[in-house]
Amino acid sequence: MNPQSVNSDHPCELARPLGALSSWQERRAKELMLRDMGSCVRISEIAEHCNLSRSHFSRAFKKSTGHSPQGWLVRMKIEKAKSLLITSMPITDVVYECGFADHSHFTHTFSRLEGMTPKAWRRAVDHVITNRRPNTPMIDRDISDRRIPDSVVDGLRQLRAQALHA
């Protein structure tokens, strides 16, 4: 192994790609981005907390995660939105809770990443949770010919139950 490919905070840390963030930098950056998800996250401020320039931070973050900082944050916002969409929270509230500026931008971003609108995704999940029998394909005009594994269905049921009791 090339010793230059190891960015180590600790002697037992696994090898990280050359040019990637150290584990503490990646952890700190993600914590800051998630904490401020609902507001405007400034990459320059996060870079400063990691003791890096903005450009170096952006390159190293992408090397570490496979996504730009902004791309990673958008994916996290969509994951949060999906967890809220399985509740009865109105989509308009989900939009703002996840830090999107408006409904249109949220719908466009969600559709690009998930392949369907938030409303269609919610209907599909509701259909799966309430009507699906084990090992049967889910038929819905927005997501026909897709199968959802039983483990996913069970997980969605548990999340829905937790959300209803929260």
Image (tube, grey):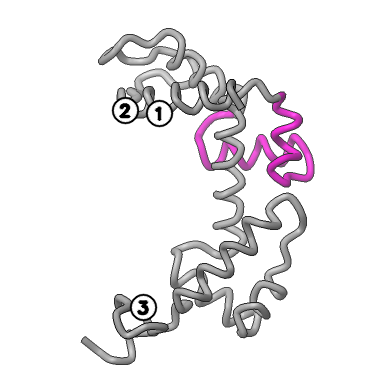
Q: Earlier in the sequence, mark 3 or mark 1?
A: 3
Q: Quadrant of residue 33?
A: bottom right
Kind of residue indicated by mark 3: Pro
Q: Report the magenta stretch's main SS.
A: helix
Task: Give the secondary structure at mark 3.
Answer: loop
Q: Badge 2, how many Cα within 10 Å: few under 14, some, many 20+?
A: few
Residue that mark 2 sits on: 151
Kind of residue indicated by mark 1: Gly
Identity of the residue drawn at 78% across and 45% down: 101
Please give the label number shown on residue 17. 3
Q: Position of residue 142 (x, y in %)?
A: 50, 20
Circles 2 and 1: CB atoms closer than 8 Å: yes
Give the left or right position of residue 142, taking residue 133 as reference. right
Kind of residue indicated by mark 2: Ser
Of the 4 image quadrants, the one containing the C terminus is top right
Q: Earlier in the sequence, mark 3 or mark 2?
A: 3
Q: Badge 3, how many Cα within 10 Å: few under 14, some, many 20+?
A: some
Above or below, 26 relative to 124:
below
Please give the label number shown on residue 155. 1
Q: Position of residue 54 (x, y in %)?
A: 65, 79
**C-alpha gap between disc 3 and disc 1:** 34 Å
Identity of the residue drawn at 54% across and 25% down: 121
Above or below, 73 relative to 54:
above
Of the 4 image quadrants, the one containing the N terminus is bottom left
Q: Badge 1, how many Cα within 10 Å: few under 14, some, many 20+?
A: few
Identity of the residue drawn at 54% across and 29% down: 116
Task: Give the secondary structure at mark 1.
Answer: helix
Give whichever of 9, 99 is nearer the camera. Answer: 9
Q: Position of residue 87 (x, y in %)?
A: 60, 24
**C-alpha gap between disc 3 and disc 2:** 34 Å
Residue range in magenta is 90-117
Give whichever of 164, 50 is nearer the camera. Answer: 164
